[in-house]
Image: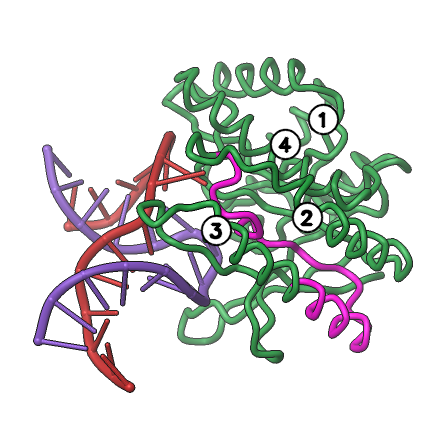
Chain colours: A green, B red, C purple
DNA sequence: CCATGTCAAGGTCAC
DNA sequence: GTGACCTTGACATGG
Protein backbone atom coordinates (compact mmCIF):
# COMPACT_ATOMS: atom_id res chain seq x y z
CA UNK A 1 0.00 0.00 0.00
CA UNK A 2 1.12 3.51 -0.79
CA UNK A 3 0.13 6.56 1.22
CA UNK A 4 0.28 10.18 0.18
CA UNK A 5 -1.42 13.54 0.31
CA UNK A 6 -2.85 16.18 -2.02
CA UNK A 7 -1.14 19.10 -3.67
CA UNK A 8 0.40 21.07 -0.81
CA UNK A 9 3.55 20.38 1.16
CA UNK A 10 3.79 22.55 4.26
CA UNK A 11 7.30 21.46 5.20
CA UNK A 12 9.57 22.55 2.38
CA UNK A 13 8.74 26.22 1.92
CA UNK A 14 7.68 26.26 -1.71
CA UNK A 15 4.32 26.01 -3.44
CA UNK A 16 3.51 24.20 -6.67
CA UNK A 17 0.08 25.93 -6.60
CA UNK A 18 1.26 29.38 -7.45
CA UNK A 19 -1.10 31.23 -9.76
CA UNK A 20 -2.12 34.78 -10.60
CA UNK A 21 -5.21 36.75 -11.48
CA UNK A 22 -6.68 36.34 -14.94
CA UNK A 23 -6.46 40.13 -15.30
CA UNK A 24 -2.69 39.98 -14.99
CA UNK A 25 -2.28 37.19 -17.54
CA UNK A 26 0.76 37.34 -19.80
CA UNK A 27 2.95 34.73 -21.39
CA UNK A 28 5.88 35.82 -19.23
CA UNK A 29 3.79 35.55 -16.13
CA UNK A 30 2.69 32.07 -17.14
CA UNK A 31 6.22 30.90 -17.89
CA UNK A 32 7.51 32.29 -14.59
CA UNK A 33 4.72 30.66 -12.61
CA UNK A 34 4.96 27.27 -14.30
CA UNK A 35 8.75 27.31 -13.94
CA UNK A 36 8.30 27.83 -10.22
CA UNK A 37 5.53 25.25 -9.94
CA UNK A 38 7.46 22.52 -11.73
CA UNK A 39 10.57 23.25 -9.71
CA UNK A 40 8.56 22.96 -6.51
CA UNK A 41 6.77 19.81 -7.69
CA UNK A 42 10.18 18.26 -8.21
CA UNK A 43 11.21 19.19 -4.65
CA UNK A 44 7.96 17.82 -3.23
CA UNK A 45 8.42 14.52 -5.01
CA UNK A 46 11.96 14.17 -3.68
CA UNK A 47 10.74 15.01 -0.17
CA UNK A 48 8.00 12.42 -0.58
CA UNK A 49 10.38 9.70 -1.73
CA UNK A 50 12.67 10.45 1.23
CA UNK A 51 9.68 10.02 3.57
CA UNK A 52 8.35 6.99 1.71
CA UNK A 53 5.20 8.82 0.59
CA UNK A 54 4.73 7.25 -2.81
CA UNK A 55 1.32 8.64 -3.71
CA UNK A 56 0.73 12.25 -4.63
CA UNK A 57 -2.05 14.39 -6.05
CA UNK A 58 -0.66 17.04 -8.38
CA UNK A 59 -2.46 20.37 -8.15
CA UNK A 60 -4.69 21.52 -11.00
CA UNK A 61 -2.96 24.90 -10.71
CA UNK A 62 0.33 23.48 -11.94
CA UNK A 63 -0.29 25.26 -15.28
CA UNK A 64 -2.67 28.13 -14.43
CA UNK A 65 -5.37 28.94 -17.01
CA UNK A 66 -4.17 26.10 -19.23
CA UNK A 67 -7.68 25.44 -20.56
CA UNK A 68 -8.84 29.04 -20.54
CA UNK A 69 -9.42 30.69 -23.94
CA UNK A 70 -6.85 33.31 -22.98
CA UNK A 71 -4.06 30.75 -23.07
CA UNK A 72 -2.47 30.01 -26.44
CA UNK A 73 0.92 29.14 -25.05
CA UNK A 74 2.37 25.75 -25.97
CA UNK A 75 3.58 24.85 -22.49
CA UNK A 76 4.02 21.17 -23.39
CA UNK A 77 6.71 22.03 -25.90
CA UNK A 78 8.27 24.83 -23.87
CA UNK A 79 8.67 22.69 -20.75
CA UNK A 80 9.19 19.41 -22.57
CA UNK A 81 12.51 18.50 -20.96
CA UNK A 82 11.49 19.46 -17.42
CA UNK A 83 8.24 17.54 -17.74
CA UNK A 84 10.00 14.48 -19.10
CA UNK A 85 12.58 14.60 -16.31
CA UNK A 86 9.93 14.81 -13.60
CA UNK A 87 8.01 11.99 -15.27
CA UNK A 88 11.12 9.87 -15.34
CA UNK A 89 11.68 10.47 -11.63
CA UNK A 90 8.08 9.47 -10.93
CA UNK A 91 8.42 6.30 -12.97
CA UNK A 92 11.80 5.29 -11.57
CA UNK A 93 10.57 5.63 -7.98
CA UNK A 94 7.24 4.04 -8.79
CA UNK A 95 5.27 7.03 -7.46
CA UNK A 96 1.51 6.87 -7.99
CA UNK A 97 -0.03 10.09 -9.29
CA UNK A 98 -3.55 11.49 -9.32
CA UNK A 99 -5.11 14.82 -10.20
CA UNK A 100 -8.47 16.16 -9.06
CA UNK A 101 -10.04 18.90 -11.22
CA UNK A 102 -12.34 21.21 -9.30
CA UNK A 103 -16.08 21.40 -8.92
CA UNK A 104 -16.50 23.46 -12.07
CA UNK A 105 -16.00 20.39 -14.21
CA UNK A 106 -19.50 19.10 -14.85
CA UNK A 107 -19.77 16.52 -17.60
CA UNK A 108 -23.49 15.99 -17.05
CA UNK A 109 -24.60 19.62 -17.21
CA UNK A 110 -27.62 20.29 -19.46
CA UNK A 111 -25.63 23.26 -20.76
CA UNK A 112 -23.38 22.21 -23.64
CA UNK A 113 -20.99 25.11 -23.14
CA UNK A 114 -20.32 24.00 -19.58
CA UNK A 115 -19.75 20.43 -20.76
CA UNK A 116 -17.35 21.56 -23.47
CA UNK A 117 -15.37 23.75 -21.09
CA UNK A 118 -15.20 20.86 -18.66
CA UNK A 119 -13.89 18.51 -21.34
CA UNK A 120 -11.26 21.07 -22.27
CA UNK A 121 -10.15 21.30 -18.66
CA UNK A 122 -10.02 17.52 -18.33
CA UNK A 123 -7.98 17.34 -21.51
CA UNK A 124 -5.48 19.75 -19.97
CA UNK A 125 -5.08 17.40 -17.00
CA UNK A 126 -4.68 14.50 -19.40
CA UNK A 127 -2.12 16.44 -21.46
CA UNK A 128 -0.12 17.17 -18.34
CA UNK A 129 0.04 13.51 -17.31
CA UNK A 130 0.80 12.55 -20.90
CA UNK A 131 3.64 15.07 -20.98
CA UNK A 132 5.09 13.30 -17.93
CA UNK A 133 4.89 10.10 -20.00
CA UNK A 134 2.88 8.40 -17.27
CA UNK A 135 0.82 5.32 -18.04
CA UNK A 136 -2.94 4.88 -17.50
CA UNK A 137 -2.42 4.19 -13.79
CA UNK A 138 -2.06 7.95 -13.27
CA UNK A 139 -5.67 9.00 -12.76
CA UNK A 140 -7.89 12.06 -13.03
CA UNK A 141 -10.67 11.94 -10.44
CA UNK A 142 -13.93 13.84 -10.86
CA UNK A 143 -17.39 13.85 -9.37
CA UNK A 144 -20.43 12.84 -11.41
CA UNK A 145 -21.90 16.37 -11.39
CA UNK A 146 -25.28 17.96 -10.77
CA UNK A 147 -28.70 16.38 -10.21
CA UNK A 148 -30.95 19.10 -11.72
CA UNK A 149 -33.97 17.52 -9.98
CA UNK A 150 -33.88 14.59 -12.40
CA UNK A 151 -31.22 12.21 -11.18
CA UNK A 152 -31.85 9.35 -13.61
CA UNK A 153 -31.61 11.59 -16.64
CA UNK A 154 -28.58 13.34 -15.19
CA UNK A 155 -26.84 9.99 -14.76
CA UNK A 156 -27.75 9.13 -18.35
CA UNK A 157 -26.21 12.40 -19.53
CA UNK A 158 -23.00 11.55 -17.68
CA UNK A 159 -22.85 8.11 -19.26
CA UNK A 160 -23.44 9.47 -22.77
CA UNK A 161 -20.83 12.16 -22.33
CA UNK A 162 -18.27 9.74 -20.92
CA UNK A 163 -18.78 7.32 -23.79
CA UNK A 164 -18.04 10.05 -26.32
CA UNK A 165 -14.77 11.16 -24.70
CA UNK A 166 -11.58 10.37 -26.50
CA UNK A 167 -9.81 7.20 -25.50
CA UNK A 168 -6.75 8.80 -23.90
CA UNK A 169 -8.98 10.71 -21.49
CA UNK A 170 -11.26 7.77 -20.76
CA UNK A 171 -8.23 5.72 -19.75
CA UNK A 172 -7.36 8.20 -17.03
CA UNK A 173 -10.77 9.26 -15.77
CA UNK A 174 -12.21 7.84 -12.56
CA UNK A 175 -15.33 8.94 -10.67
CA UNK A 176 -15.57 9.61 -6.97
CA UNK A 177 -18.61 9.46 -4.69
CA UNK A 178 -19.53 12.86 -3.27
CA UNK A 179 -21.08 13.83 0.05
CA UNK A 180 -24.40 15.01 -1.30
CA UNK A 181 -25.62 13.86 -4.69
CA UNK A 182 -23.95 10.71 -6.02
CA UNK A 183 -23.25 7.86 -3.62
CA UNK A 184 -20.97 4.87 -4.03
CA UNK A 185 -23.99 2.89 -5.25
CA UNK A 186 -24.73 5.49 -7.92
CA UNK A 187 -21.11 5.39 -9.04
CA UNK A 188 -21.15 1.59 -9.14
CA UNK A 189 -24.21 1.75 -11.41
CA UNK A 190 -22.40 4.17 -13.71
CA UNK A 191 -19.42 1.84 -13.73
CA UNK A 192 -21.67 -0.98 -14.85
CA UNK A 193 -22.66 1.03 -17.92
CA UNK A 194 -19.28 2.56 -18.75
CA UNK A 195 -16.48 0.62 -17.08
CA UNK A 196 -15.20 3.79 -15.41
CA UNK A 197 -13.37 2.91 -12.17
CA UNK A 198 -14.81 4.24 -8.91
CA UNK A 199 -12.58 6.03 -6.41
CA UNK A 200 -13.82 5.50 -2.86
CA UNK A 201 -13.96 8.65 -0.75
CA UNK A 202 -14.42 7.29 2.76
CA UNK A 203 -15.24 10.63 4.31
CA UNK A 204 -17.95 11.46 1.79
CA UNK A 205 -19.32 7.96 2.15
CA UNK A 206 -19.66 8.36 5.89
CA UNK A 207 -21.76 11.49 5.33
CA UNK A 208 -23.91 9.96 2.60
CA UNK A 209 -23.74 6.18 2.42
CA UNK A 210 -27.27 5.20 1.33
CA UNK A 211 -27.20 2.25 3.71
CA UNK A 212 -23.98 0.71 2.44
CA UNK A 213 -21.33 -0.19 5.05
CA UNK A 214 -17.73 0.88 4.59
CA UNK A 215 -16.63 -2.65 4.01
CA UNK A 216 -19.37 -3.42 1.45
CA UNK A 217 -18.60 -0.18 -0.35
CA UNK A 218 -14.89 -0.97 -0.33
CA UNK A 219 -15.28 -4.40 -1.86
CA UNK A 220 -17.60 -3.02 -4.54
CA UNK A 221 -15.34 -0.18 -5.62
CA UNK A 222 -12.22 -2.37 -5.64
CA UNK A 223 -13.87 -4.56 -8.24
CA UNK A 224 -14.21 -1.59 -10.61
CA UNK A 225 -10.44 -1.26 -11.09
CA UNK A 226 -8.72 -3.38 -13.75
CA UNK A 227 -5.04 -4.30 -13.88
CA UNK A 228 -4.47 -1.54 -16.40
CA UNK A 229 -5.96 1.00 -13.99
CA UNK A 230 -3.59 -0.10 -11.23
CA UNK A 231 -4.18 -0.64 -7.54
CA UNK A 232 -7.45 1.04 -6.49
CA UNK A 233 -7.13 4.53 -5.06
CA UNK A 234 -8.89 5.57 -1.87
CA UNK A 235 -9.49 9.05 -0.55
CA UNK A 236 -9.46 9.26 3.22
CA UNK A 237 -9.74 12.38 5.35
CA UNK A 238 -10.84 13.24 8.85
CA UNK A 239 -12.24 16.02 10.97
CA UNK A 240 -10.77 17.45 14.09
CA UNK A 241 -13.09 17.57 17.10
CA UNK A 242 -14.16 21.14 16.44
CA UNK A 243 -15.27 20.32 12.92
CA UNK A 244 -12.24 21.68 11.13
CA UNK A 245 -10.88 19.51 8.43
CA UNK A 246 -7.27 18.79 9.26
CA UNK A 247 -5.96 16.86 6.34
CA UNK A 248 -6.08 14.01 3.91
CA UNK A 249 -4.25 10.85 3.38
CA UNK A 250 -4.66 8.53 0.50
CA UNK A 251 -3.77 4.96 0.11
CA UNK A 252 -3.57 2.61 -2.78
C1' DC B 1 4.80 46.36 5.22
C1' DC B 2 0.37 44.36 6.50
C1' DA B 3 -4.71 43.53 6.28
C1' DT B 4 -8.28 41.89 3.81
C1' DG B 5 -11.29 41.34 -0.18
C1' DT B 6 -11.16 38.62 -4.02
C1' DC B 7 -10.01 35.03 -7.29
C1' DA B 8 -12.40 31.54 -14.29
C1' DA B 9 -15.54 28.45 -13.76
C1' DG B 10 -21.19 25.38 -11.41
C1' DG B 11 -24.45 23.41 -8.37
C1' DT B 12 -26.70 23.01 -4.01
C1' DC B 13 -28.55 24.33 0.20
C1' DA B 14 -29.67 27.35 4.20
C1' DC B 15 -31.59 31.38 5.08
C1' DG C 1 -33.32 35.65 -4.25
C1' DT C 2 -28.84 36.00 -2.09
C1' DG C 3 -24.85 34.21 -0.35
C1' DA C 4 -21.92 30.47 1.69
C1' DC C 5 -19.73 26.47 0.62
C1' DC C 6 -16.93 23.27 -1.93
C1' DT C 7 -9.98 20.80 -2.13
C1' DT C 8 -7.57 25.56 0.03
C1' DG C 9 -4.26 28.99 -0.54
C1' DA C 10 -2.42 33.03 -2.51
C1' DC C 11 -2.93 37.22 -5.38
C1' DA C 12 -3.53 42.11 -5.47
C1' DT C 13 -5.16 46.24 -3.83
C1' DG C 14 -5.41 49.81 -0.48
C1' DG C 15 -3.99 51.46 3.70
Q: In terms of secondary structure, where does tag 3 sit?
A: helix
- Alpha carbon separation for disc pair 2 and 1: 25 Å
Q: Earlier in the sequence, mark 2 or mark 4?
A: 2
Q: Tag 4 or tag 3, which sits nearer the N-term?
A: 3
Q: For the residue labelled by badge 4, is the local secondary structure a helix, a strand or a loop?
A: helix
Chain ID, mark 1: A
Q: Is residue A50 magenta?
A: yes
Q: Residue at x 37, y 22 (%)?
A: A149
The image shows residue A82 at horizontal and vertical percentages of 74, 54
Q: Which residue is mark 4?
A: A187
Q: Which residue is mark 1?
A: A170
Which chain letter goes with mark 2?
A: A
- The answer for how far apart the CA atoms under marks 3 and 2 are is 14 Å
Q: CA distance from mark 1 to mark 4?
A: 15 Å
The residue pinned by badge 3 equals A28
Q: Is residue A127 left or right of residue A72?
A: right
Occupied quadrant, residue A1: bottom right
Horizontal side, residue B9 vs residue A212: left or right: left
Amino acid sequence: MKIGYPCINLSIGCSSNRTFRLKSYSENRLVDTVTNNLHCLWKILKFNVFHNLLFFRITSDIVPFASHPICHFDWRTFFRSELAAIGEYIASHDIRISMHPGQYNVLNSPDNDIVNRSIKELKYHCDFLDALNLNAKAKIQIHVGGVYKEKDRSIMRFIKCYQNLEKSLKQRLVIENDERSYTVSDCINIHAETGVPVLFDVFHHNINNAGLTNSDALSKVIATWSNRDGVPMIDYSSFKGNGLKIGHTYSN
